[in-house]
């Protein structure tokens, strides 16, 4: 089992920045692909970003490319999502997820462990 705990969400004005953290515990973190997803009210959960086990490969949703950066620190068992130039459309609950495989994935179904989510609210 892998336990994931997100933090860093909150209320921010449009144009602002936030950094989300996801701390992992339990079974080995460093050999897992990780991802961030988000879900806005009334919408389906959507892919945001993913990172490979080594951090050498990352992918982003088109909607966040150039504004968000995913990274990881395997010595701290933590993955981060640095978010910038935020807009009200970024308002959602953000979820961290872990795979049992090493590589990236944009697919919700390919993640095996999920955090409880952290709320990000961007005001206009």
Image (cartoon, rainbow, N blue to C red):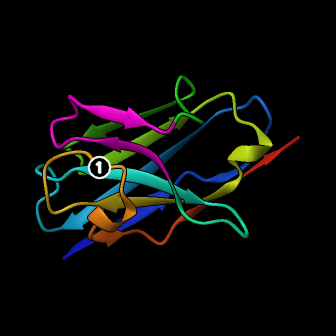
* Residue 75 to residue 93: above or below: above
Q: Which of the two residues, 102 or 110, is positioned nearer the viewer here?
A: 110
Residue at 10 percent across and 50 percent down: it is 31
The picture places residue 118, in percent across and down from the top left corner, at 57, 62
* Residue 66 to residue 63: above or below: above
The picture places residue 101, in percent across and down from the top left corner, at 13, 56
Q: Which of the two residues, 118 or 102, is positioned nearer the viewer here?
A: 102
From the viewer's perspective, is 51 left or right of 7?
Answer: left
The picture places residue 46, in percent across and down from the top left corner, at 53, 56
Residue at 50 percent across and 35 percent down: it is 82
Give the magenta range: 47-61
Question: Is label 1 in a helix, a strand or a loop?
Answer: loop
From the viewer's perspective, is 39 left or right of 123?
Answer: left
Residue 69 seen in the figure = yes
Image quarter of the C terminus: top right
From the viewer's perspective, is 15 left or right of 2?
Answer: right
Circle 1 residue: 105
Q: Which of the two residues, 109 or 88, is positioned nearer the viewer here?
A: 109
The picture places residue 102, in percent across and down from the top left corner, at 13, 49
């Amino acid at each position: 089992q892998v336990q994931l705990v997100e933090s860093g969400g909150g209320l921010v004005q449009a144009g602002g920045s936030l950094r989300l953290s996801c701390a992992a515990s339990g079974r080995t973190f460093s050999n897992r692909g990780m991802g961030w997803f988000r879900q806005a009210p009334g919408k389906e959960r959507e892919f945001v970003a993913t990172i490979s086990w080594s951090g050498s490969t990352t992918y982003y949703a088109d909607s966040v490319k150039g504004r968000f950066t995913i990274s990881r620190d395997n010595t701290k068992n933590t993955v981060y999502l640095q978010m910038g130039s935020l807009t009200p459309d970024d308002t959602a609950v953000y979820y961290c997820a872990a795979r049992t495989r090493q590589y990236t994935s944009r697919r919700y179904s390919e993640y095996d462990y999920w955090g409880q989510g952290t709320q990000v609210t961007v005001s206009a």
